[in-house]
Image: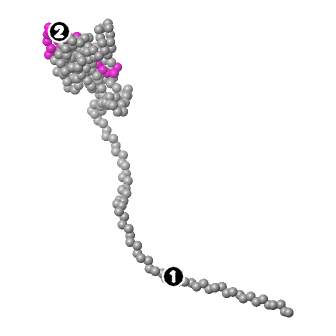
Amino acid sequence: MSPEKKTTKKEKPEEKQEIKEEKTPKKPVAEKKSTSPKKEPKAQAKKTVKKSKPKIGPEAKKALFSPKIEKVTINIGVGEAGERLKKAETVLESITGHKPIETLSRTTSKDWNLRKRMPIGCKITLRGTDADEFLKEALSTRENKMADYSFDDEGNLSFGIPDHTLFKSQKYDPNIGIYGMDICITMKKHGYRVKHRRIQTRRIPHRHRVKKEETVKFFSETFKVEVIQ
C-alpha cells in the first residue's frame, strides 16, 4: 500500500476589518468664572536714591555740643524732725516760690539720734527759667566769685550759702533764725536723655561728656562768674 499523502491547508490570515469610528463633534466647554480677585500687575521696584545729609551750620553745631544747666538742687539739712524742719521749709519756699520736699535718713545711728527713714531736712529742684533766676540771686550773694575746687570732673558745680538773709528778698526774723543751704548745679549736653530713659539705656561716651573747662567757660560767659584758683 502506498503511504498516505498528508495534505496541509494553508490557513489564510483573517483580514481585520477596520472599523471607522464616527467622530462626534465635541461640545464647547464653558469657561469657569474665577471668584478670586484679579491679581494686579507687580509694581516696578523704585530705584533708591541716596540722599545727602544736610550740613550742620556752625551755630547749630555749637548748640549741640555746648553745655547747659539740667537742674539746680537746693538742700537744707536740719538733722532732726519737728519745728526746726518746718521753719527750714518756709525759708526755702519764700526764696524759690515752690514747695520743698522732705529728705529722709537712710540709716539708723544712735550717736546722732537718727532712725531709718526719719525726716532730717528738705530740698527743692529747679529747672528752666526758675533755675536761671535763682542762680543769678545766689551767685550775687558771693559777689559772682567761685573757687576752682567747686567744679568737679563731670562739669557739675556745688557751693554753699551760710546765711539765707544774704538774699535781697530775705530779712532776718528772730522767730525763724538763720539757715544755711547747699546748692548743686547739674550740667548736661544734648543727648544725655539716653542714660535716663527706661528702654535701651546707653552710656554717654567720654568725648560727649561735660568737662570742667567747658562749665567754667559757660558760667564766666553767661553769669559773669570769676573763678578763683
Dot 1, crowdedness within 10 Å: few (<14), some or many (≥20)? few
- Work out whether 47 lies above or below 4: above
Q: Earlier in the sequence, mark 1 or mark 2?
A: 1
Q: Residue furthest right?
A: 1
The spot of residue 117 in percent (x, y) is 29, 16
Q: Is residue 50 left or right of residue 178?
A: right
Q: Is residue 107 left or right of residue 134?
A: right
Q: Could you tell me which quadrant the C terminus lies in?
A: top left
The spot of residue 134 in percent (x, y) is 20, 20
Q: Is residue 146 magenta?
A: no
Q: Look at 57% across and 84% down and name the residue there.
A: 18
- Work out whether 118 lies above or below 211: above
The spot of residue 31 in percent (x, y) is 38, 70
Frontmost residue, 174 versus 63: 174
Disc 2 is placed on an element classified as loop
Amino acid at the residue labelled 1: Glu
**Based on the displayed image, in which of its 4 quarters is residue 62 positioned?**
top left
Dot 2, crowdedness within 10 Å: few (<14), some or many (≥20)? some
- Label 1 and label 2: CA atoms lie apart by 129 Å
Q: Is residue 122 visible?
A: yes
**Based on the displayed image, in which of its 4 quarters is residue 104 positioned?**
top left
Instruction: Give the residue number, with chain letter if any, for mark 2.
Output: 177
Q: Look at 30% across and 36% down and name the residue there.
A: 56
**Based on the displayed image, in which of its 4 quarters is residue 126 positioned?**
top left
The spot of residue 221 in percent (x, y) is 24, 22
Numbered mark located on residue 10 in the image: none
Instruction: Give the residue number, with chain letter if any, for mark 1.
Output: 21
Q: Look at 31% across and 40% down and name the residue there.
A: 54
Q: Which residues are magenta?
A: 153-177
Frontmost residue, 178 versus 145: 178
Secondary structure predominantly adopted by residues drawn in magenta: loop
Q: Is residue 226 visible?
A: no
